[in-house]
Image (tube, helix red, strand yellow):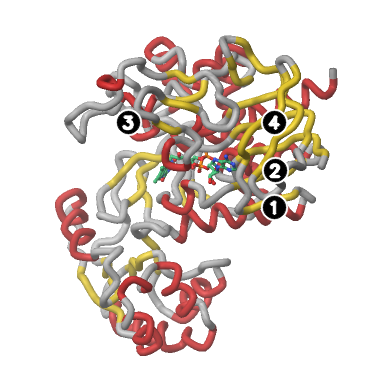
Amino acid sequence: MQFDTLIIGGGLAGLCCAIRLEEQGKHCAVVSAGQSALYFSSGSLDLLCRLPDGTPVSAPSNALNALASQAPSHPYSLIGGHIGTDGVMALAHEAQALLGRCGLDLYGHPDLNHQRITPLGTRKPTWLSPVDIPVTTLEGQLPWRKPVIVGIEGFLDFQPQMVVSSLATEQGITAEVAYLHLPALDLLRNNPSEFRSVNIARVLDQPQHSAALADELSRLAGDADCIILPACIGLDDNLALERLRAAVDCPILLLPTLPPSLLGMRFHQAMQRRFNQLGGIFMPGDKALKAQFDGQRIVGVYTRNHGDIALRARHLVLASGSFFSNGLVATRERIIEPVFGLDILSHADRGDWCQADFFAPQPYLHFGVKTDGGQRALLAGQALENVYAVGAVLGGYDPLRQGCGGGVSLISALYAARQIVLAQEK
Ligand SMILES: Cc1cc2nc3c(=O)[nH]c(=O)nc-3n(C[C@H](O)[C@H](O)[C@H](O)COP(=O)(O)OP(=O)(O)OC[C@H]3O[C@@H](n4cnc5c(N)ncnc54)[C@H](O)[C@@H]3O)c2cc1C
């Protein structure tokens, strides 16, 4: 099987790169082993929220020079070394436009972070948030004074009391707690392990339950000025939420829940849909196992499902994620990238991989594949000619502490797509 580009990993980075290439007429296939980090994410994407020295960042564009001096191996610093910080920011704008073409309705701007309300009711800076979740400007406050936070009886992945308590301490907002009682959910509630956001949404999304849900929410709202629900509605689209909003005389917003996260899944579905519509081939449940090399090029990839039939492409993009997605693996002695055996940025001594204090910055979060400035992956110190690494598999940054996970995935993916198109034009 022959493609222009073969992408390993169908998470945020892999899909972004694949969509951009398909939009430019390059035929792509994505091989993706399992669920991506999006299924576990908040649904908001971070660009850059904190410098390595701990300085908070409000305007990412103003912080990229400081980032380059504090973290020269950060993907933004490497890419910026080639196309400048303006080039990095241009890719952030391009990413936002691409997500818009996927049909995602997002709030935010690359030039200025905003605050999203977390599942615990606290505030966290970020770049892009689904329009359905409550957000504020960096210094601002939520516009509501009497919201009602609606939990679902028996649903453990969202705790309304915690939200109420954080809103009171952080923003002086007096919110009420209420619980949704809907007979349609009783059958599901009988099995606590099945009582999760996705299964609840499968019930709440059905049009025949809309009227009862709207009546119950109107009753619970009382004189509240806003209803905040756990994100357990709208698995495939926003129709159920729109029906609810039309029927209830009070604004309705959603908060992300513990995984599985509907808001993150919506990202994945929208991006995969766009990729398929553009003519791309998505191979879910398949896993890249090993490569066939010809000098500094990879000329074939063998996967679990295709056995001894190699997938062939002019360019390869490794978007296999970090430890969480098995894009990186820790053995007793070292950190490896298991498909191609690429060079890894890490510490040689296992004792230096982690800090004993759970809340301290963890060195292993910086580990990942090394690339040259053109985003090409390094093997034995040399850049492979046709292999690019993007997203969480990359080394040199800490997505948790620096708040840059989503941005690194999108910007590195778009940069690789650009490099691939340029290489093909030569
Ligand atoms: C639990 C969690 C929550 C996060 N939440 C946020 C958030 O709210 N906001 C934010 O900005 N960032 C968040 N991040 C950071 C996150 O890493 C990035 O935002 C981004 O989603 C990573 O995308 P990715 O495509 O690089 O990797 P992933 O999403 O990890 O996707 C990699 C994909 O590659 C597949 N794969 C791996 N190996 C192979 C193989 N050999 N063959 C084929 N497929 C393979 C995996 O199954 C997976 O589907 C979170 C990270 C984690 C781990």
The answer to whether the residue labelled 1 contacts the one labelled 2, judged by CB atoms less than 8 Å apart, is: yes
Mark toward the viewer: 4 or 1 = 4
The residue indicated by pointer 4 is 316
Query: Eyeballing the image, is 73 above or below 409?
Result: above
SS of the residue at dot 2? helix
Which element type, helix, strand or loop, lies under badge 1?
helix
Q: Position of residue 70 (x, y in %)?
A: 37, 13
Give the quarter of the figure containing the N terminus: top right
Q: Which residue type carries mark 1? A: Arg
N-terminal label among 3 and 2? 2
Which secondary structure lies at badge 3? helix
Residue 78 image offset from top left, x and y in percent: 53, 16
The answer to whether 30 appears left or right of 80 in the picture is right
What distance separates the C-alpha of mark 1 from that of mark 2? 7 Å
Crowdedness near tag 4: few (<14), some (14–19) or many (≥20) residues, C-alpha within 10 Å: many
Q: Bin the neighbour count of mark 3 within 10 Å (Cα to Cα): few under 14, some 14-19, many 20 and up.
A: some
Q: Which residue in the structure is indicated by mark 3?
A: 401
Q: Which residue position holds label 1?
A: 274
Compare residues 106 and 301 and report the one nearer the observer.
Answer: 301
Q: Earlier in the sequence, mark 3 or mark 4?
A: 4
Q: Residue 19's mark?
A: 2
Quarter holding the C terminus?
top right
At 67% across and 17% down in the image, what residue appears? 384
Look at label 2 and name its amino acid: Ile
- One can see residue 417 in this view: no
Say which element carries label 4.
strand
